[in-house]
Image: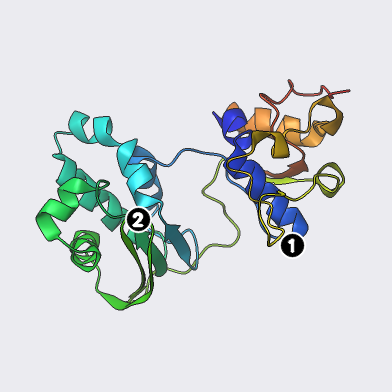
Amino acid sequence: GAREILGTPAVSTHLRWINKLKLANCFVAPEVWDYARICELAALGKPIADVMFLLSVIHHIDEVSVQQYADLGLPRLEGLVDLMGRLLLLSPRHFIELPNRPWMAAAYDAYQTPRAILEAAVVASGRPWSFRGPIFSAEWFGRRELWVLEVDTAMPPLDLQASPFLLLYRAGEDELAGVPDDPMNAFGSLDAYDQDSAVSMGRGAGVGTTASALLDSALAGTGGSIGEGSALAMPALPAMGQELA
């Protein structure tokens, strides 16, 4: 659920970077993206962003969607390609890094290369796309390539007055300011994926009433909101209207 997502080290790190870089218009949407959710977003018929950064992300969505493919009678490869095609429809511009084997094995068996896999996704999207790349490549659990895809035909405009997300969340500055950088990173980054203690703030952190109310409202399905508060490594946010001491 949203509470668990907000408490993960990855999201905690993201919230701390938002604060460190003073990104006033940057939020986290605490939700799970699987095949069903991507289908919902694509069904809106319009982009949800000007640009999407799908950096070593797609295979994770694929992994949690396997049963959904099966329930619809889709083979693993067909489900993955359709998933990727629908992802492309969410933005006119994408930066995409695919993993290498052993991930997405069905796609590599069928298409051999990241470029060919992306070309199959383009066909599934039903729109023409231009490729640039790979603009960068590196060895990380096999060779990784970064590709840029830009749509060749106009998409509907981005609706800035409506959000497709149930909740947008940003941690408050006061609660985050005292958290030190990860000493394991010589560049002073706040990366804490391998250091749970670096993002655990204990009961002293507090959770803002507004953020708690917004989260409970969103979880109840009453609509999306933009809220601020702190929810770093807390196992769960308190009930609406409560404060942590």
Nearest the eye: 176 or 136 = 136
In space, the residues marked 1 and 2 are separated at their CA atoms by 28 Å
Task: State which mark lies toward you, 1 or 2.
Answer: 1
- Mark 1 lies on a secondary structure that is loop
Q: Quadrant of residue 227?
A: top right
| Viewer can see residue 1 | yes
**Residue 86 position within the rendered picture, expressed as x and y whole percent measured from the top left:** 31, 54
Q: Please, which residue is most extreme toward the left here? A: 110
Q: Provide the residue designation for mark 1.
A: 21
Instruction: Measuring from the top left, give residue 44's x and y in whole percent.
Output: 40, 52
Which mark, residue 87?
Answer: 2
Identify the residue at horizontal 48%, vertical 58% (top origin): 48
The amino acid type found where label 1 is placed reads Leu
Viewer-proximal residue among 141 and 82? 141
Identify the image quadrant of the C terminus.
top right
| Residue 195 located left or right of residue 53 | right
Q: Estimate the x, y position of residue 191 in percent, counting from the top left.
A: 63, 50
Q: What colour scheme was applied to this rendering of the protein?
A: rainbow
Disc 2 is placed on an element classified as: helix
How would you rate the neighbour count of disc 2 (Cα within 10 Å): few for under 14, some for 14-19, many for 20 or more?
A: many
Q: Amino acid at mark 2?
A: Leu
Camera-nearest residue between 231 and 222: 231
Q: Is residue 192 above or below residue 47?
A: above
Residue for point 79% across, 47% down: 180
User: Which residue appears at 36% of the width and 43% of the height?
Assistant: 61
Left or right? Give the position of 140 relative to 30.
left
Cβ atoms at labels 1 and 2 below 8 Å apart: no
Left or right placement of residue 31 versus residue 42 in this view: right
If the image is split into quadrants, where does the N terminus sit? top right
**Residue 178 image-quadrant placement:** top right
Q: Residues within 10 Å of mark 1 (few under 14, many from 20)?
A: few
